[in-house]
Amino acid sequence: QVGSTSRSGPSRDTSPSHRSPPALIHFGAMTCRLAVGAVVVLCAPFCRGLAADDILLACASPGCDDDGAAGEASLSLLQRRAAALQSDEAKAAAESTRVAIMHRFLAELHAQGLCDDGEGDLRMVECAADNCRRCLGSGAVLLFNPGNGPQGRTVCTYQPRIPGAPSTYCGEAFRDTEGNATALEDCRCCRGEGATLKFDASAADGIGYTYCEK
């Protein structure tokens, strides 16, 4: 943080030989050691933790009139900082697009409704709840209708997605999990011992997706 300059007291000699030493200014993970005035004047939009009076006082210092190495270095720092911000924004935009693609893909997959509904009450069967969520999303639930058939019937029913809940289940994922033993175990728990994992690199606009198939 830039040290503030006193408003009162005896005047100081502001000749070049008596100017304040360079200050240490922090911009996230970046640090520069430059003349106080030059840094504040050029970097004011990026300053954090400086009171308005501190900026005004610093701008009144002789360093503000410097057009030499300090000013050029400050400008260079700002250019690098701006480039870094643009890079961060581009990465954020790309990630936002990727998430949107995955959400759309899952919505289309769930719309197929290829669930493992069955006879009897399956609500307490191991992994049956996860298998239902695999089919219709994180909010899906198993409902048992005892009047549907001699043994009743369990049906996976859609409910709105739960924020923060996992988006994939039963070993499925937006990556290749074919060789993952844990993923295969989860897949078979959901869909039976004969179930297998199959990766499609072209799925989800090229992101790729591994399906649990039986």
Image: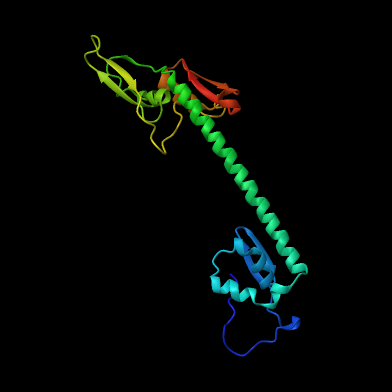
79 vs 156, left or right, is right
Q: Is residue 200 above or below residue 40?
A: above
Q: How is the image coloured?
A: rainbow
Q: Residue at x 51, y 26 (%)?
A: 105
Occupied quadrant, residue 114: top left
Image position, residue 56 (x, y; %): 59, 73
29 vs 16, left or right, is left
Q: Residue at x 57, y 86 (%)?
A: 8
Residue 172 seen anywhere in this rendered image of the structure: no
Q: Residue furthest right?
A: 68
Q: Is residue 123 above or below residue 54?
A: above
138 vs 22, left or right, is left
Q: Nearer the viewer, residue 135 or 59?
A: 59
Q: Is residue 96 above or below residue 202?
A: below
Image position, residue 12 (x, y; %): 66, 87
Occupied quadrant, residue 132: top left
Residue 6 seen anywhere in this rendered image of the structure: yes
Q: Residue at x 61, y 42 (%)?
A: 91
Occupied quadrant, residue 188: top left
Q: Residue furthest left?
A: 147
Q: Is residue 173 above or below residue 44?
A: above
Q: How many numbered badges does the structure rendering display? A: 0
Quick one: quadrant of the N terminus? Answer: bottom right
Q: Residue furthest top?
A: 150
Q: Residue at x 60, y 23 (%)?
A: 202
Image position, residue 117 (x, y; %): 35, 16
